[in-house]
Image (cartoon, rainbow, N blue to C red):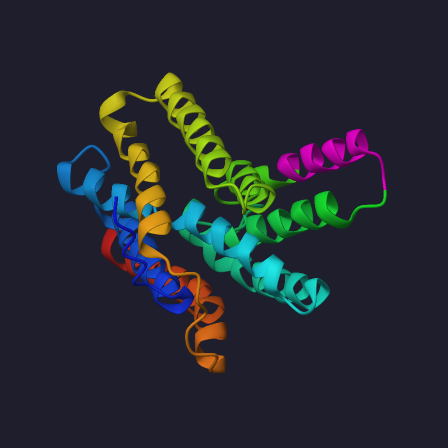
Amino acid sequence: MTKLHSLNRNELKYLVIIAMLIDHIAWAFVPTASLLGQIMHIIGRLTGPTMAYMLADGYYYTHSVKKYACRLGIFALLSWIPFSYFELGHIGLQFGVIYTLLLSLLAIWLWDKGRCPQPVKVLGIIGLCILSLFGDWAIFDILYALFFFCYRNNPQKKWTAFCMLTLFCCGNMLATTPWWLAFFQVGIFLVFPLIQFGYNGKSGSKKPFHKWFFYVFYPLHLLILGVLRWVVFA
């Protein structure tokens, strides 16, 4: 298959931000069992794993993992109330995907730089997965990011691990949810052609706007959608 490689990092980021917005609009206003709801959620499945991929890529190229982690930590906190209100309808102990990405970064950092035996690293990553249960894309984004980092130079192993993890994710949901409500999970598989054949690995423009847009947009759009849903269904 010909590699198109037409999207740089910024363009890929904006594409998955649009996919995320479509997904969240569907969760707020469109019945999941409807055809439109399933299509919108299939599109939305691009977001979590692609963000995990970009995080693993970002870890490799960042000049300071500590600054990267602090940035994620600050915006995970700022996103807490908007996400919690959007997800639960009230303020609770529920965090968004930035929180999970922070844990994913820590998992990669531990695996790559941790000065401890490998079994201890595994236990640490299990602990981070448990903490991720309070966030969006719990467990799976941590494992996606870790596999993307560990196998970054081996496409066969990278995508095999991705597909196996995605099959488990889909199977887990189908085991607890009727298939017509859970079918949209197959959209995760679309991440493979998007990245493998669409992403050129280049960063694109380094203007600060591109760096900060997602961090600001994420809590802002959740707050707006949460309020709109309250207005519409109150």
* Residue closest to the far top: 175
Residue at left 45%, top 80%? 209
Residue 100's place in the image compared with 171, above or below, is below
Residue at left 31%, top 55%? 198
Q: Give how far across and how far down residue 22 sits, in percent.
A: 26, 54
Rendered-image quadrant of the N terminus:
top left
- Foreground of the two, 3 or 128: 3
Residue at left 66%, top 61%? 69
* Residue closest to the far front: 2
Q: Is residue 90 left or right of residue 5?
A: right
Q: Which residues are magenta?
A: 116-130
Answer yes or no: is residue 19 visible: yes
Q: Give how far across and how far down residue 195 sits, in percent.
A: 37, 50
- Foreground of the two, 234 or 123: 123
Residue 82's place in the image compared with 119, above or below, is below
Q: Is residue 149 left or right of residue 40?
A: right
Q: Give how far across and how far down residue 121 sits, in percent.
A: 76, 36
Residue at left 38%, top 66%? 8
Q: Give how far across and how far down residue 54 sits, in percent.
A: 49, 56
* Residue closest to the far bottom: 207
Chief SS of the magenta region: helix
Task: Give the total number of marks visible in the rendering.
Answer: 0
* Residue closest to the far left: 35
Q: Is residue 114 left or right of residue 184?
A: right
Residue 134's place in the image compared with 205, above or below, is above
Answer yes or no: is residue 45 visible: no
Is 222 one of the magenta-colored residues? Answer: no
